[in-house]
Image (cartoon, rainbow, N blue to C red):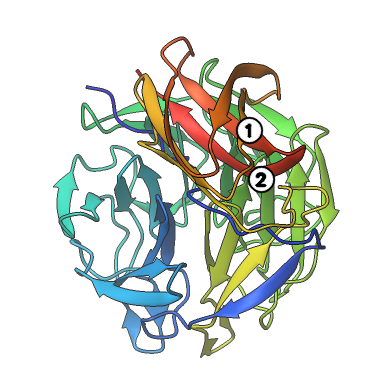
Amino acid sequence: MKTNHSILIILFMSIQIAKADYWTQKADYGGSPVASAIGFSISNKGYIGLGISSGGSQNDFWEYDPSLNQWTQKTNFGGTARHGATAFSLGSKGYVGLGSDINFANDFWEYDPITDLWIQKTSFPASARAFASGFSIYNKGYIACGIDASHPVGDLWEYDSALNSWTQKSSVIASPGGFFAAVSFVIGNKGHITTGYGVSQTYEYDPINNSWSLKTGCPLNAYACAGFAIGVKGYAGTGFSTTNQFWEYNSGNNSWIQKTNFGGLPRLSATAFSIGNKGYLGTGQNGNTFYNDFWEYTPDTTTAINELTNSNTTSIHPNPCHGSFTFSYQNLSPTSIFKMMDVTGKPVYTQTITGIEGTQKINASGLSDGVYYYEVVSDKKIMGVGKMVVIK
């Protein structure tokens, strides 16, 4: 049985005049001010939990709804309280494990947001550790690097949720002994790890060839940073020594450019995730001060996802899809064009959309498994964009 991919669709977007990137403060994180927490997103919700506060390690767990700008407490993490844990999402489930409190941990847990339950899964098979990097590509999860009881490590492990099993993959190209407290994100079908204690390089992982490539280092030159991906760009910011710088990585030309500084105070060990075409970053600490403020990042719409005039809503479900999906829309012109592109930008599918609003069935059975982007062109304007995954 195949599982869903972690990179999910942009469920909807508000269309507005193009502008430079900016930060907007949102509702404070629902838990205590905390650092070294975990974060991930599933569909149109974000999740933050665990971490360390002035009172010690935590195990509470919270869901963020960006449409309501509201936090809701969910069932506490199934394992013991800890900080420096690792997390990623696969389809409709979240996965959390490792970390430390008094001792380093290697237990591993699955969270189902529908049932709001945690189920313990096969433990991470390598040394117990904290501050490892986690990401997911297609229907597999990955955990890399970290620090165990002896030293930093540089190994990589792949998790198959269908089999509930781990497989060791190629180790990260890094300084001897590996590194920890790094940022990870996924662009297209490649994983990326950057910054980290003792290194500033960027490493790209190709799961098809099981190989790492060395890329341009992040000029942030920090560790315990936070980051996420939006579309085809990766982002990294904040970190030690308590900076609020924020940088964007373009995998197409292997370059970094500095963006608008994080909107909050400088900090390290913050938590971040992305939902659709927005990034979210919050929590963290500066010395003995812990934070629970939470911020939304909108990328530069003149160079990232186009946001034009007119208000509309577009959505696709299910996503990931297994051969066909339904496209829902409103506020379009009577005749519009739905286009799909692969991760290189090559057009792979086009269909005419009729009517100002409604739904239309789209057959994707001829497409290979993978990540795709879509856009809706109405009256010569791009009225909706998004990302989707095809898994058969």
Quadrant, the C terminus: top left
Q: Which residue shows up at 19% across the image and 68% down it?
A: 75
Q: Which residue shows up at 62% across the image and 63% down it?
A: 225
Q: Is residue 313 above or below residue 211?
A: below
Q: How many badges with numbers are in the image?
A: 2
Q: Which residue type carries mark 2?
A: Met
Residue 119, disc: none
Q: Is residue 168 above or below residue 57?
A: above
Instruction: Please state the horizontal and vertical placement of residue 286, each as a whole percent of the image.
Output: 60, 83
Quadrant, the N terminus: top left
Kindly indicate whether the residue at mark 2 contacts the one at mark 1 (C-beta within 8 angstroms).
yes
The answer to whether residue 243 is left or right of residue 50 is right
Q: Which residue shows up at 62% across the image and 44% down it?
A: 384
Q: Which residue is mark 1?
A: 336
Q: Is residue 88 visible?
A: yes
Q: Is residue 269 visible?
A: no
Q: Quadrant of residue 4?
A: top left
Instruction: Please state the horizontal and vertical placement of residue 317, each as a whole percent of the image.
Output: 38, 38
| Label 1 to label 2: alpha-carbon separation | 9 Å
Residue at the top extreme? 366
Q: Which residue is mark 2?
A: 383
Disc 1: CA contacts within 10 A as few (<14), some (14-19) or many (>=20): many
Instruction: Please state the horizontal and vertical placement of residue 329, each as a whole percent of the image.
Output: 50, 44
Instruction: Please state the horizontal and vertical placement of residue 298, each as a whole percent of the image.
Output: 68, 62
Q: Which residue shows up at 65% across the image and 68% down it?
A: 239
Front disc: 1 or 2: 1
Relative to the observer, which residue lies in front, 314 or 346?
314
Relative to the observer, which residue lies in front, 118 or 131?
118
Judged from the image, the secondary structure of the residue bearing numbered disc 1 is strand
N-terminal of the two: label 1 or label 2? 1
The answer to whether residue 211 is left or right of residue 69 is right
Q: Which residue type carries mark 1?
A: Ser
